[in-house]
Image (cartoon, rainbow, N blue to C red):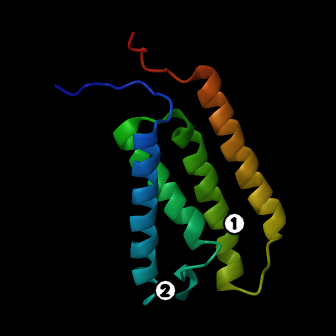
Amino acid sequence: MAQNKAACCSSPASICYWSAASLVAWGVLNIIRIYWHPLHASSATTIPFAMAIGCAASWLRNRTFHCAISGPVFLIAAFVFLPSDLTTFRVNTVWAWIFVLMGVGVAFLLEWWYGKRPASKS
């Protein structure tokens, strides 16, 4: 029978898992770049998209509370940057990254206030 896990706070293991999943996603997106040029390694589209994939993986495995919020923030940022890589339309990157930093900051604050912490061992 499937067990329903509640959302919890970040741990060093969950942060390492997010980092590894994001790095793997970034590598796969760089391979896709061979066929679709906007996904090059340092693209403002590729980086937040890989981070969103890392958040999705971390949420599915660890149920880290902030990933439920920051994952969609990274995904929105990736789609905001995508027209800049495809057309001559330019996005003010400073404001977009401020939005990302504020969204992730709010996600961590909400996790700190409302996330379920594991019981301490005495």
* Relative image position of residue 80 (x, y in whole percent): 69, 66
Left or right of residue 85: residue 8: left
Disc 2 marks a residue whose amino acid type is Trp
Q: Position of residue 121 (x, y in %)?
A: 38, 14
**Residue at the extreme top of the image, as rendered:** 122
Is the residue 78 above or below the residue 14 in the image?
A: below
Q: To which residue does mark 1 refer?
A: 80
How much space separates mark 2 and mark 1, taking CA atoms?
17 Å
Q: Is residue 15 above or below residue 85?
A: above
Q: Residue furthest left?
A: 1
The count of marks equals 2
- The relative height of residue 113 versus residue 13 in the rendered view (above or below) is above
Examine the image and state in which quarter residue 103 appears. Answer: top right
Can residue 14 be seen at all in this image of the molecule? yes
Which quarter of the image is occupied by the C terminus? top left
Q: Secondary structure at mark 2?
A: loop
Determine the residue positioned at 42% across, 42% down. 14
Q: Label 2, on which residue?
A: 36
Tell me, yes or no, if residue 56 can be seen here: no
Q: Determine the secondary structure under disc 1.
A: helix
Q: Give the numbered dot on residue 54.
A: none
Give the residue at x 61% y 56%.
74
Structural crowding at the residue carrying mark 2, measured as other residues with C-alpha within 10 Å and reported as few (<14), some (14–19) or many (≥20):
few
Name the residue located 75 percent from the left edge and 60 percent from the top edge: 97
